[in-house]
Image: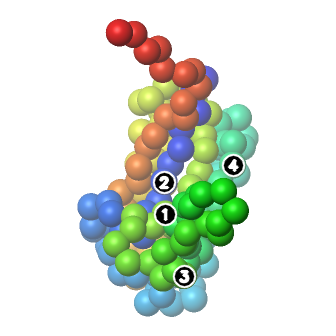
Amino acid sequence: MAKYLLLKHYRGAPEAVNSVPMDQWTPKEVDDHMQYMAHFAARLEGTGEYVDGQALSPEGTFVRYDGEGRPPVTDGPFAETKDLIAGWMVIDVDSYDRAVELAGELSAAPGAGGKPVHEWLEVRPLLTELPTVSE
């Protein structure tokens, strides 16, 4: 089994087919989307493939160490061109192909008008071994 991170992006990914921002959805469309996500996670819990997942707030700050005795440097509470992550899910599956299959299914979560969002999800394997460095 290998673990993969499925990333949902606010932006930075190619545009979804049904790319109406969630803040323009009806409350029922939001509920349907969240139920789809919860059902998807519950089904993967049953197969032993679900590890964890969370939705993230659109707010965030980049922080950088600025030297001994100095406060961390931040970019402010605003977000401009950064690639924001809307949410994530970690799955533990037998193969990359299974991770892609599940990401495709998750991409079909309903959105505006009850139609699938068809959003692009990033599939990234978790690093389980340090890379070998050779000269």
Q: Circle 2 is placed at which residue position?
A: 7
- Position in image of residue 48 (x %, y %): 70, 35
Label 1 Cα crowd, 10 Å radius (few <14 / some 14-19 / many 20+): some
Q: Inspect the image, locate mark 1, and give the three-letter code of the amino acid beneath it.
A: Ile
Disc sitting over residue 77 in the figure: 3
Residue 62 falls left or right of residue 11: right
Picture disc at residue 85:
1
Cα gap from disc 2 to disc 4, whole angstroms: 12 Å
The amino acid at mark 4 is: Asp
Element marked by disc 4: strand
Residue 28, picture quadrant: bottom right
Residue appearing at x 44%, y 78% in the figure: 79
* Nearer-N-terminus badge (3/1): 3
Q: Is residue 100 visible?
A: yes
Q: Nearer the viewer, residue 125 or 64?
A: 64
Q: Earlier in the sequence, mark 3 or mark 2?
A: 2
40 up-or-down from 62: above or below: above
Q: Which mark is in front, 1 or 4?
A: 1
